[in-house]
Amino acid sequence: MTFREKVAELVNAALEERPSLFLIDLSISDSNKINVTLDGDNGINLQDCIDVSRAVEHNLDREEQDFSLEVASAGATSPLKNIRQYKKNIGRTLKVKTESGETEANLTDATEEFIVLEWKAREPKKIGKGKETVQKRAEIPYAEIKEAVVVIKF
């Protein structure tokens, strides 16, 4: 078993004990710097990161392989990468970049194939002068999403 496989197995085992947490990214550099990025259905706290870090670190032997380990949460401004991240952010505003442009809208649904965005737009009236507010809706397949970020409002 390679070092990378062993680390991945330990991370997965630690996450099985905590079903509300999920892996966003696992990277290991040539110098054995291990970076684990996590998220959770109900958010993630410092203790979650500590628990996963200990589960990995205590089962690796520094005599066999020297390494450094960093376990962190996906930041509030990090792009969404996982379907579970989209599902936990239903009801929030997202900025979604696709081939056809950029949309800032409310995430109303996330299925296994696509997300649903809804927003209001001002458009010219069909009859007469002036503009009217219309409700817009878009279903965007995950394959078309280049980047999606939660918009934080204060």
Image (cartoon, grey):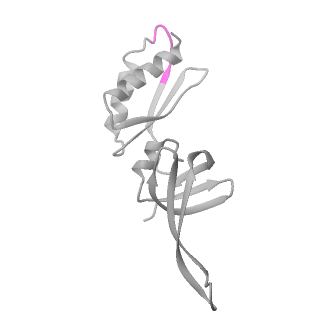
Toward the viewer: 38 or 145?
A: 145
Please tell me whether the stretch drawn in magenta is mainly helix, strand or loop: loop
Furthest-right residue in this view:
99
Q: Quadrant of the C terminus?
A: bottom left
Furthest-top residue in this view:
64
Toward the viewer: 42 or 49?
A: 42
Q: Which residue occupies 51% across, 52% down?
A: 115
Confirm whether the magenta stretch covers residue 3.
no
Which region shows up in magenta?
62-68
Furthest-bottom residue in this view:
128
Residue 109 found in image quarter = bottom left
Indicate the position of residue 5 as horizontal and vertical percent values: 50, 17
Furthest-front residue in this view:
127
Indicate the position of residue 133 as horizontal and vertical percent values: 53, 80
- Please say if 102 is above or below 66: below
- Please say if 123 is above or below 117: below
Q: Which residue occupies 62% across, 84% down?
A: 126
- Judge from the rendering whether residue 96 lies leftward or rightward of residue 75; answer left or right: right
Q: How many marks?
A: 0
Indicate the position of residue 142 as horizontal and vertical percent values: 56, 46
- Please say if 30 is above or below 37: above
Q: Which residue occupies 54% across, 24% down?
A: 33
